[in-house]
Image (spheres, rainbow, N blue to C red):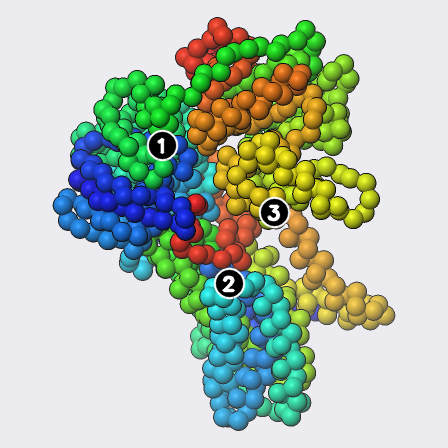
Amino acid sequence: MKVALRDIRKYFGQVKANDGISLVLESGQIYGLLGENGAGKSTLMKILSGYHQPDSGQIELDDKDVKFSSPAEALANGVGMIYQDPLDVPSMRAVENYLLGRDLRINLAYSAATSEMIENASQLGFKIDPQAFIDTLSIGERQQLELLRLLALGAEVLILDEPTTGISAEQKEGLFASIRKLAKESGKTVILVSHKLSEVQELCDHVLVLCKGKFVGEVDIPCSTERLVQMMFKEIPPRSSRVSYLREKNLLELSQVEFEGERLAVTGINLTVRAGEVFGLAGLEGSGQKLLLQACAGLIQPKRGKIILDGEDVTRFSYHQMRAASVAYLPAGRLEEGLVAGLSLIEHVALARPQKGFVVDWNYFERITQSQIDKYQIVGRPETLVHELSGGNQQRALFALLRSPLKLLLLEHPTRGLDVLSAQWIWQLLLNRVEEGSSILYYSADLDELVERSDRIAAFSGGVMSRIVTATETTADELGHLIGGEE
Amino acid sequence: MNDSELVRILSSIVLQSTPLAIAVCGETITERAGVVNLSLDGTMLLSAMVGFVAGLLSKSVWVGFLAAAGVGALFAFIIAFGSIRLRKDQFAVGFVLTLLGDELSAFLGQNYTRIPGQKVSHLGIPLLKDIPILGPMFFDHDLVVYFTFILVGVTWWWMFRTQHGLRLRSAGERPEAGFVRGINVNRLRYIYTLVGGSLVGIAGAAYSLDIKLGWSEGHTRGLGWIALAIVIFGGWSPIRGAFGALLFGASKALAAALQRRFPEESVVVFNATPWVLMIAVLLLVGSDATDRLIALVPRRFQSRLRQLLRVRPPGALGTLFIPGEAGGE
């Protein structure tokens, strides 16, 4: 199906999210939609998928004017979207989810739907148990289910929003293969919204670039990464020079440490992090790397082994003791675990820095907050509520709240969801810490980030830690193998 | 205790449990759609009173039930309108309605206390009632009891076997997901809150017109809270909820039997037994212990057992749904 967007405008108050965007998308082609945070990608896709209505402009499908008042109406016209967090009902079975909103008969034909689902799934090479509950499936499987559902409902245009976040490499291969098949054999129009340039280059035929609400250019793949970045940002972000602040002293030593999570046991961890070292952990979600950070943060107690921090045995330390020992832990869920939604920046600062006395001196904290806002370049005011900040600014706020000096900084996905410049900025902040002598132990799903930023890297696979590699001597390729559990 | 006495006790447990089962069913429907109607205690009191008086004045129990359902629907509407349209906290509104219903029933019903009124007439089902034990237990009652059986069955079928049920559950579990599938979540929530509230009203009248005849101040006080607890206990399933109501009735009967056995003990001790039982089951069924138990069972039964034992509340219970804001950003 041919899609034409004509002069689409969508303003949110002062913000021109889409400022006159015109695009034409041909059927059978895979398009990558690129742009930094706030460039207007998601707004544009939400307009195309019926979530938002444009303030002005037209959408044409196969040269016919259409207007959508809801996502369901868009889908009825052939436009379906797969959201980053699949929009399904976790407590239902896969087949129920497949039928929801679709089969309008009162008494549902479960067995027919089940066999139809299995058949459609096998055509795309997916394996899903129709009787499985959604909340027992992985994100990748839920995406597959959504894809099946959209196709069954006659989607001709498929929008995928950051589809590879949180899925395994194998599932990614499967997803990409099925997308290629759908585009090339069934003539679907596919739009991939992504931050990951390598994936765009791997999958797409063309790249469309948005910048500040405007369409700034289109290139055919293959095309160099530098060119793409240049189009997105108008400048290539400086590659950080890999200055190492490694010191001789061992800061953190784990020997034969064993611990258990809800679904996973991790055994035999031997790891030494030196002062001033940036140590990266690779691995698929849930392979044990998060548990390791939690063990180092005192959130879970090791069953066996020893953890030494700066010469002190901290094996049995609680989270608060670890905190007192200058260990900081920044979890991935910024709003869920790191910040208190509903409290302002100034209240966060007051919480993070206990003062003497019973009554809070708000003037004092306002001054401190303002200085932190300036220092960390947070777009917001002291009284701004944290959940109103953008993701990048929330991340900055978390850093602004960290105490100084710190011995050990534990980070999960430090730059997930941030654009290249914000990520660069965050790493600059982190390197300043390292320069002061802090060590960083972090994990990330972004292999390029791991290779670029770390001194040494280890990978986790099914609760087992791989050998440790030196970042300057490894490649994303080698890490990929380690993550897969190969030596 | 001989057989006939046991059968008589079992039969009375079934009878005594019906209003509670109706209320539980109604609230289960409401909560499955994502709305909490906390006003059950007040709604039941007011509808018991209104149902009794309407029945008395019209000389028809059915008019009484209809009026009671209207009261229940009205309270439910206030909650739905307050939370969906005005975006007010449904727990706060429900709680205040509880108090309002209590006081209002006492005030409006003060001239009708302790006087005889209408009663639902007994109607044994021919043939079925002659089945040994089961007959007297289930089929030698009145229309309210049979209505309850049908209600529970139909509600379960509606929820888990029909497209309407899928939609109902999606509204309570993940309204965003329903929305992208073309479901008008807030309209569904209005409808099911009203349906649930009407059933709670009928439950109130089932007391004053049938199970606990007549009206006096605070006639059904406390039973609404019990119904709310049984909804949770029943894991938001109409059938398990009905069993919860039966279990509660049985433990009440057990308490009465114990009381007869040990007359010297204080009655308060025995009245606490249902609660002890209920809290024990609640703590056990909702805990990790069940997950561990399920893990021991052969894999192909796990999913079924999981559904049987699951007591997770609907994912979006008590939350607002604003279509434009769904899906983030």
Question: Which three-letter amino acid code belongs to the residue tagged 2?
Answer: Arg
Image coordinates for residue A215, horizontal then vertical, percent: 28, 36
The residues tagged by marks 3 and 1 sit, at their Cα atoms, a distance apart of 30 Å
For label 3, the SS is: loop
Residue at mark 1: chain: A
For marks 3 and 1, the one nearer the N-term is 1
**Which residue is nearer to you in this view: B16 or A99?**
A99
For label 1, the SS is: loop
Question: Which three-letter amino acid code belongs to the residue tagged 1?
Answer: Gly
Residue, disc 3: A383
Q: Residue, x 83% and y 69% (percent of image)? A: B266
Residue, disc 1: A35
Compared with B249, A47 (above or below) is: above
Compared with A61, A330 (above or below) is: above
Q: Residues within 10 Å of mark 2 (few under 14, many from 20)?
A: some
**Which residue is nearer to you in this view: B120 or A23?**
A23
**Which residue is nearer to you in this view: B17 or A470?**
A470
Quarter of image, res B150? bottom left
Q: Residue, x 36% and y 49% (percent of image)? A: A11
Q: How many marks?
A: 3
Question: Which three-letter amino acid code belongs to the residue tagged 3?
Answer: Glu
Image coordinates for residue B326, horizontal then vertical, percent: 42, 50
Q: Residue, x 53% and y 8% (percent of image)? A: A470
Residue, disc 2: B87
